[in-house]
């Protein structure tokens, strides 16, 4: 006879909210992490209509939800919604991770930047310390990674953007962290960088920021936050112009997810096999 007190409690509930959301790999990634670490949880993808994030988060929390990932276009809304922000989320001006407490308290964090750093530093054995680093773009994707990159103490960080004023404003906002400057794409001539990070969405449209042919330093690396089954336009350009390593953003996606999972569950999953499996599934 079975013990009436021997039952499995309902798994803890987590989700990713965004619009669109059907393409999200987050449920697959977090389910793998849970299996790896023996955690009892359920992770789903939820479509949220513009202007309704606060209501959606409130409903999810009221129904016992423990945590959320927030993706495009709601990261700034989540930043404003949070009752408390981590320092890295405050600096990023955006939130991609919410920690939901039973009393209704919402804590916001941003794991995008540390996801990028861990992918380059840990998965690819790259380094930031004393490197000359160029970030292409001055939007939310760039803003979210500046603080964690500066924690690694690069020699310099240059933010280049089509609209110069946005690059200058972003550099000024983070200048307390170290040697950071902003410029237009047309001001990059004569400069060379050890690591170039594409934080624009140009790759999604098959476009390329206008860059000098000799901008990659000897032994330089290039990183595109975008990813796909084939190398992006930027990564093809990088390889053709002498980059010794060209990396897409799939590892960043998995690493930011691992950081969120670790915050929620107190255990760090193994990302290498998840990255490998996702890559294999994408490339067929």
Image: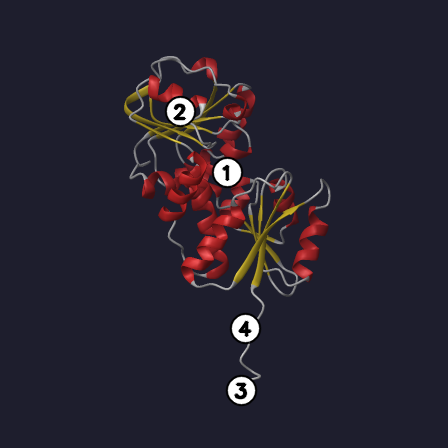
State the CA–CA distance, disc 3 to disc 1: 56 Å
Q: How is the image coloured?
A: secondary structure
Give percent across and percent down for residue 151.
38, 42
Residue position for label 2? 235
| Element type where label 1 sits in the image | helix
Tell me the number on the disc at residue 144. 1
Tell me the number on the disc at residue 1. 3
State the CA–CA distance, disc 2 to disc 1: 21 Å
CB contact under 8 Å: marks 2 and 4? no
Q: Looking at this view, is 53 or 45 the one in front?
A: 45
Considering the image in quadrants, where does the C terminus appear?
top left
Residue at 51% x, 27% y is 200
Q: Is 94 located above or below residue 103 in the figure? A: above
Q: Looking at this view, is 135 or 124 the one in front?
A: 124
Which of labels 3 and 2 is toward the front? 3
Which of labels 2 and 1 is toward the front? 2
Which numbered disc, 1 or 4, marks the residue that appears first in the sequence? 4
Q: Quadrant of residue 58?
A: bottom right
| Element type where label 4 sits in the image | loop
Which of labels 3 and 4 is toward the front? 3
Q: Is 177 located above or below residue 35 in the figure? A: above
Residue position for label 4? 8
Would you call the spot at circle 1 few (<14 residues within 10 Å), some (14-19), or many (20 or more)?
Answer: many
126 sits to left or right of 63? left
Residue at 57% x, 71% y is 9
């Amino acid at each position: 006879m079975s013990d009436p007190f021997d039952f499995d409690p309902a798994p803890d509930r987590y989700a990713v909210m965004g619009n669109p959301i059907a393409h999200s790999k987050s449920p697959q990634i977090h389910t793998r992490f849970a299996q790896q670490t023996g955690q009892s949880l359920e992770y789903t993808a939820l479509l949220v209509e513009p202007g309704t994030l606060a209501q959606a988060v409130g409903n999810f929390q009221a129904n016992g939800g423990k945590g959320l990932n927030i993706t495009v276009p709601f990261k700034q809304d989540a930043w404003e919604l949070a009752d408390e922000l981590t320092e890295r989320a405050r600096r990023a001006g955006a939130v991609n991770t919410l920690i939901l407490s039973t009393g209704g308290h919402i804590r916001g964090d941003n794991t995008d930047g540390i996801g990028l750093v861990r992918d380059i530093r840990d998965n690819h054995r790259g380094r930031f310390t004393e490197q000359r680093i160029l970030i292409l773009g001055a939007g939310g994707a760039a803003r979210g990674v500046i603080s964690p990159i500066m924690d690694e103490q690069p020699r310099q960080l240059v933010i280049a953007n089509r609209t110069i004023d946005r690059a200058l404003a972003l550099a000024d906002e983070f200048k307390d962290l170290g040697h950071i400057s902003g410029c237009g794409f047309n001001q990059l001539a004569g400069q060379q960088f050890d690591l170039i990070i594409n934080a624009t969405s140009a790759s999604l449209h098959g476009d390329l920021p206008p860059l000098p042919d000799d901008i990659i330093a000897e032994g330089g690396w290039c990183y595109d936050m975008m990813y796909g089954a084939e190398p992006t336009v930027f990564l093809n350009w990088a390889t053709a112009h002498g980059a010794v390593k060209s990396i897409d953003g799939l590892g960043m996606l998995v690493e930011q997810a691992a950081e969120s999972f670790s915050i929620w569950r107190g255990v760090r999953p193994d990302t290498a096999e998840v990255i490998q499996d996702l890559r294999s599934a994408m490339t067929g």
